[in-house]
Image (cartoon, rainbow, N blue to C red):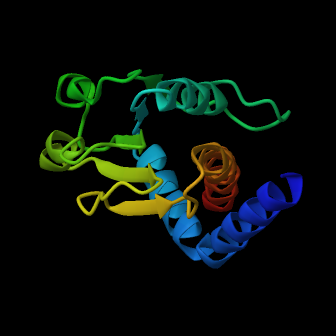
C-alpha cells in the first residue's frame, strides 16, 4: 500500500512542478495587490475551511524572521462574505471552491485564486489544480501551493522595495 501512495504522491508532485509557472504568476499578481493595500480573504469548502484558516495565519503571522505580516482574513467555509468584506484591491483565495463562489469577488474586481482538486473553476483569475484523485494527496499539494504562494509573494515584495 505504501508504494501505491508514494506513486500517487510522486505523480501529483511532478504535476505541481509542471504547473509552477502558474503558481509564480499568481504570486506575482498577489504581490501587486498587497502593494496596493489589498488583503487576502481565504475560504475553503468543507474540510478545506481549516486550510483557509492556515492560509490566513501564514500571511498574518510569518514564521520566518524578517518577513513582514500581510493582511489576511479567513472566511471559513463562507464565500458569501466576499461581497460584504471584499474591496477591489483584495485577493480572494478559495480552496476547493464551488462553481459560482467567486462571482461577487470578480464583480468587485478582486483578484481570484482557486486551489482546486477536480472541481471546475473557470471563473477564477488563477486556477491552481492539485492533480490527484486522492483527496489527501490533493490536500498535501494545496498545502505546498499556498506555502509556495506565501514565499513567492515575499520574494516579489522584497524585489519591489
Quadrant where the image shows the C terminus: bottom right
Rendered residue at 17%/30% (across/down) = 83
Residue sitting at 68 percent across and 24 percent down? 61
Residue 79, by quadrant, is top left
- The percent coordinates of residue 9 (x first, y second) are 75, 59
In the image, taking residue 121 as reference, residue 54 lies left or right, namely: right
Q: Is residue 101 above or below residue 28?
A: above
Residue 134, position in %: x, y?
A: 60, 51
Q: How many marks?
A: 0
Asked whether 41 or 48 is in front, the reply is 48
The image shows residue 94, relative to residue 127, as above or below, that is: above
Residue at 40%, 41% in the rendered image: 94
Identify the image quadrant of residue 32.
bottom left
Asked whether 157 or 139 is in front, the reply is 139
Q: Position of residue 97 (x, y in %)?
A: 34, 43
- Is residue 154 rendered to the left or right of residue 83? right
Q: Residue at x 83, y 59 (%)?
A: 6
- Residue 52 horizontal/vertical position (percent): 51, 30
Q: Nearer the viewer, residue 154 or 118?
A: 118
Left/right of residue 26 with respect to residue 17 in the rendered view: left
Q: Quadrant of residue 136?
A: top right
Residue at the extreme front of the image, as rendered: 1
Amino acid at each position: 500500500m505504501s508504494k501505491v501512495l508514494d506513486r500517487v504522491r510522486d505523480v501529483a508532485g511532478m504535476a505541481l512542478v509542471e504547473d509552477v509557472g502558474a503558481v509564480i504568476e499568481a504570486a506575482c499578481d498577489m504581490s501587486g495587490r498587497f502593494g496596493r493595500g489589498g488583503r487576502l480573504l481565504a475560504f475553503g469548502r468543507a474540510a478545506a475551511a481549516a486550510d483557509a484558516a492556515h492560509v490566513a495565519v501564514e500571511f498574518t503571522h510569518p514564521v520566518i524572521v524578517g518577513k513582514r505580516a500581510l493582511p489576511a482574513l479567513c472566511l471559513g467555509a463562507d464565500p458569501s462574505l466576499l461581497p460584504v468584506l471584499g474591496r477591489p484591491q483584495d485577493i480572494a483565495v478559495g480552496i476547493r471552491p464551488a462553481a459560482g463562489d467567486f462571482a461577487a469577488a470578480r464583480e468587485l474586481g478582486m483578484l481570484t485564486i482557486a486551489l482546486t482538486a477536480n472541481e471546475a473553476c473557470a471563473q477564477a483569475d488563477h486556477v491552481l489544480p492539485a492533480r490527484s484523485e486522492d483527496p489527501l494527496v490533493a490536500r498535501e499539494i494545496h498545502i505546498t501551493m499556498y506555502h509556495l504562494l506565501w514565499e513567492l509573494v515575499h520574494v516579489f515584495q522584497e524585489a519591489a522595495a
